[in-house]
């Protein structure tokens, strides 16, 4: 794919998302911090998932500036349309792979 395709895609997504509301992941329970335990990382993953699921067309889910959120992915998300994720701060993956989801869908903090 060409560079212009990707530029157009990002511009279109940005334009679509700019007309809705901003949804702060903290409003869904995300907790900022550098040194979090597995339970908090899983909780943050769920908060991000919940924020994305609450978003509608044109909305933007935001990780606020100046904050670092360590997370474990909660679950796949399907069916999002014209929703943007804006990372003004930092989203980081939890360091211990033992806390990450297992193929059977269970989490073990």
Image (cartoon, rainbow, N blue to C red):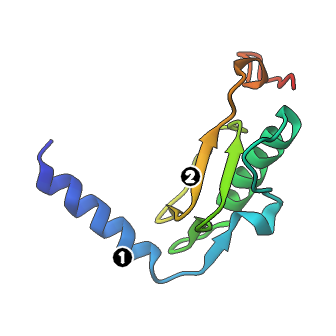
Residue 38 place in picture, x, y as percent: 83, 32
Q: Nearer the viewer, residue 45 or 67?
A: 67
The label on residue 79 is 2
Residue 51 place in picture, x, y as percent: 70, 61
Indicate whether 47 appears above or below 71: below
Q: Nearer the viewer, residue 58 or 101?
A: 101
Q: Is residue 66 left or right of residue 54?
A: left
The label on residue 15 is 1
Classify 10 Å Cα crowding around label 1: few (below 14), some (14-19), many (20 and above): some
Q: Residue at x 70, y 44 (%)?
A: 70
Image quadrant occupied by the C terminus: top right
Q: Nearer the viewer, mark 2 or mark 1?
A: 1
Residues at marks 2 and 1, CA–CA distance in whole angstroms:
19 Å
Q: Earlier in the sequence, mark 2 or mark 1?
A: 1
Residue 72 place in picture, x, y as percent: 71, 36
Dot 2: element: loop
Q: Is residue 87 left or right of residue 40?
A: left
The label on residue 74 is none
Q: Residue at x 27, y 59 (%)?
A: 9
Indicate whether 5 appears above or below 95: below
Residue 25 place in picture, x, y as percent: 71, 63
């Amino acid at each position: 794919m060409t560079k212009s395709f990707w530029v157009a895609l990002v511009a279109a997504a940005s334009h679509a998302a700019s007309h809705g509301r901003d949804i702060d992941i903290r409003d869904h329970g995300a907790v900022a911090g550098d040194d979090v335990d597995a339970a908090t990382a899983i909780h943050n993953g769920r908060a991000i998932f919940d924020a994305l699921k609450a978003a509608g067309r044109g909305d933007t889910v935001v990780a606020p500036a100046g904050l670092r959120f360590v997370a474990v992915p909660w679950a796949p998300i399907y069916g999002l349309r014209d929703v943007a994720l804006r990372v003004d701060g930092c989203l980081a993956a939890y360091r211990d792979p033992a806390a990450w989801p297992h193929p059977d869908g269970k989490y073990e903090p």
